[in-house]
Image: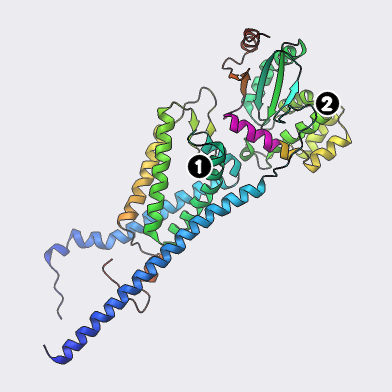
Amino acid sequence: MSVTLTTTESGPGIRWRTLRPWLGTVVRLGLAAVWLYAGASKVGDLAASGRAVHAYQLMPYEVAKVVGAALPFVELGLGVLLLLGVATRLSAVVSTLLLVAFIVGIVSAWARDLAIDCGCFGTGGELPPGESPSYWLDLLRDLGFLLLAGFLVIWPVTRISIDEWLASAPEAEEGDE
Amino acid sequence: MSKRAGQKQAARVVREQLARERRRRRTIWTSVIAAAVLVIGGVIGWGIYATQRSGEFVPPPGATEDGTGIVTGSGPVTVDIYEDFLCPACRAFEEQSGATLDQLAAEGKAQVVYHPIAILDRFSTTRYSTRSSAASGCAAEGGKFREYARLLFENQPPEGGAGLSDDRLIELAAGIGLGDDFASCVRDGRYKGWTEHVTDAAAERGVRGTPTILVNGQELRDRSPEGIRSAVEGAGG
């Protein structure tokens, strides 16, 4: 059988197909770092994490306490999964859902004129008087993270990952994806 | 196409199908494992938090009925003060308006309730907010909550450091006549559970920063001595 490269597959097209999985690796590790940092900054004081959630005034305190205690561990879990590249698409989908929830929270706090620290990376709660919240920056940053997660939802195949290693295990032939 | 070639091709199709099936199953299993990691992580988080809470607490003498603060003075108006001993704005507030509050309490115009909450534990390496709040409970046991609180603010350590050691907390108390019982109270962490209760109750009430001052439940924005006095007198004190 002879292999013929059609013209459409040469040039920029083929470069994208080779580069994409490597770009995906960078994106995956970047998002992993975000989650690991976010989780690590909250895990030392779970009560404070609950209070930061409560500061958004979106749920009763009892619920906020549970969410606040669970959240850092879910973030750390996502960080580890993405770092290793296990179930990348699922991790990216969960990341997307979480980020959308955070963005909704920030927008709603902004709309209600709450003067709170987003609590994204530790701290959180009400700001001292005279200090205005930087909702702008928080939103832009979260939207940036959302782009990273979206990339991995669309193209979850990345180099140097457990997913890749599993897919190329001896018996299984590499498919197109 | 020869018969042999046909068989070969059929075998390849079957092989590919099997491989695809294997891949699919692997994907499902890794997804299940990953989802389990996230769910179990969340449950572990809640479990750790739940066991960290002591649940039981003993309020120090002089505390309010619900045990969420220390009462000084009495009067027709209730002033609630929420402070963290590590908070610089609380120190400034104490320097500016602490004496006025003591006067209002002494004049019988207001009952001033101090809630020493611990929301800044992550800004010291030794959970100084909790330790100092629990120590103030020990001082309340010795009947010297206000004196000790003033000392704590005067000797406030910077944020981000180790805070004052337990030894130093005991030494400060010795200066105002709190002795061995205070020392063992601090070392045993007798009021750490109470500190948790005070902090939790404040969060539930919607207190999100320190200092927060409530006059008959209304948040006071003007924290100057004049602002406090006029708010108390306006409320009937």
Residues in magenta, as a range: B195-211
Q: Is residue B67 left or right of residue B227?
A: right
Write down the residue under mark 2.
Answer: B143
Q: Is residue B181 visible?
A: yes
Mark 2 to mark 1 CA distance (whole Å) = 40 Å
Above-or-below relation of A168 to B178: below
**Quadrant including the N terminus of chain A:** bottom left
Q: Secondary structure at mark 1?
A: loop
Three-letter code, disc 1: Phe
Q: Give the number of the disc on residue B204.
A: none
Q: Which label lies toward us, 2 or 1?
A: 2
**Quadrant including the C terminus of chain A:** bottom left
Dominant SS of magenta comes to helix
Q: Secondary structure at mark 2?
A: loop
Residue B175, position as x, y percentages in the image: 85, 28
Residue B27, position as x, y percentages in the image: 37, 66
Residue at left 37%, top 56%?
A: A26
Q: Is residue A84 left or right of residue A40?
A: left
Q: How is the image coloured?
A: rainbow
Q: How many residues crowd around disc 1 within 10 Å: few (fewer than 14), some, or many (20 or more)?
A: some
Disc 2 and disc 1 on one polypeptide chain: no
Residue at left 54%, top 48%?
A: A70
Q: Is residue B159 left or right of residue B168?
A: left
Q: How many residues crowd around disc 2 within 10 Å: few (fewer than 14), some, or many (20 or more)?
A: some
Residue B118, position as x, y percentages in the image: 66, 35
Residue B137, position as x, y percentages in the image: 77, 32
A105 magenta-colored: no
Write down the residue under mark 1.
Answer: A121
Above-or-below relation of A92 to A175: above
